[in-house]
Amino acid sequence: MKKIIIGITGASGSILAQYLIKGISAHDVACHCVLTGNGERVFEYETGQSFDDFIKSLGETSCAIVKHDNDNLFAPIASGSYGFDAMIIIPCSMGSLAKIAHGYADSLLLRAADVCIKEKLPLLVVPRETPLSVIHLRNMLTLSEAGATIMPPMPAYYQHPTTVSEITWLTVGRIMEKIGIPNEYHQTWQGAK
Ligand SMILES: Cc1cc2nc3c(=O)[nH]c(=O)nc-3n(C[C@H](O)[C@H](O)[C@H](O)COP(=O)(O)O)c2cc1C
């Protein structure tokens, strides 16, 4: 069973985390979620329900979903020896991105990302901010050089999405593909005349 960590910060775009968890929930995956304080608040503000209520609303799933307290540095995902497969930070605020880029690891989310980098495990960062300052861009470069994959949620307009939901699934499908979970949302380009 794959062990995936989903980190949710206080950037806009909670719907991305919501859809990613929905997508993963149909698979035999251990899904460890950790939210920052502002991640919890923005999630509720943007989606209209608390993260805990959202998880309850999924009912029985194929996926084992565990939510960890961001202050709990004793959680299994705080250690490389736990052996997780990948971490996705979605959406990732510029604040968390800066901290991870500089090895600041005083919360569970930041520590798990730090572990990914030191253990050379896949770390997918889905940053959300616009416009991007030179500081944001430098921090993204630092993370990319450290092995992380920077995946801004930029719509693939050539897929002709017409709703926010379609745009979100396209982004989430691409992320799932990247962490080795095949899915119907990711559409491969077959060429065009
Ligand atoms: C409604 C709302 C939307 C926000 N959107 C963003 C955003 O898109 N990107 C960002 O970097 N920060 C955004 N912020 C600010 C972050 O929440 C703030 O910088 C916070 O300290 C990030 O901390 P965290 O990474 O620990 O969650 C937003 C805040 C609020 C209240």
Image (cartoon, helix red, strand yellow):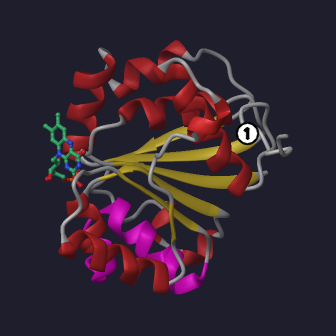
Q: Position of residue 140 (x, y in %)?
A: 36, 73
Image height check: is 122 above or below 193?
below
Quadrant showing the C terminus:
top right
Task: Tell whether 146 sits left or right of 107.
Answer: right
Task: Tell whether 190 sits left or right of 15.
Answer: right
Along the line of sight, the residue nearer the viewer: 165 or 42: 165
Quadrant of residue 45 in the image? top left
Task: Tell whether 108 sits left or right of 168.
Answer: left
Considering the whole magenta stretch, tell me its main secondary structure.
helix
The image shows a total of numbered marks equal to 1
Give me the residue at 47% from left, 86% from top: 145
Task: Tell whether 133 sits left or right of 88.
Answer: left
Give me the residue at 51% from left, 18% from top: 163
Quadrant of residue 133 in the image? bottom left
Q: Position of residue 88 (x, y in %)?
A: 51, 55
Q: Could one spot residue 105 in this view of the protein?
A: no
Quadrant of residue 65 in the image? top right
Q: Could one spot residue 59 in this view of the protein?
A: yes
Q: Position of residue 41 (x, y in %)?
A: 20, 32
Tell me where the magenta segment starts and ends, as one range. Answer: 100-120
Q: Residues within 10 Å of mark 1 (few under 14, many from 20)?
A: some
Along the line of sight, the residue nearer the viewer: 166 or 26: 166
Q: Position of residue 87 (x, y in %)?
A: 54, 60
Along the line of sight, the residue nearer the viewer: 72 or 98: 98
Image height check: is 66 above or below 160?
below
Amino acid type, callout 1: His
Which residue lies under the disc numbered 1?
186
Q: Is mark 1 within 8 Å of ligand 1?
A: no
Residue positioned most to the front: 193
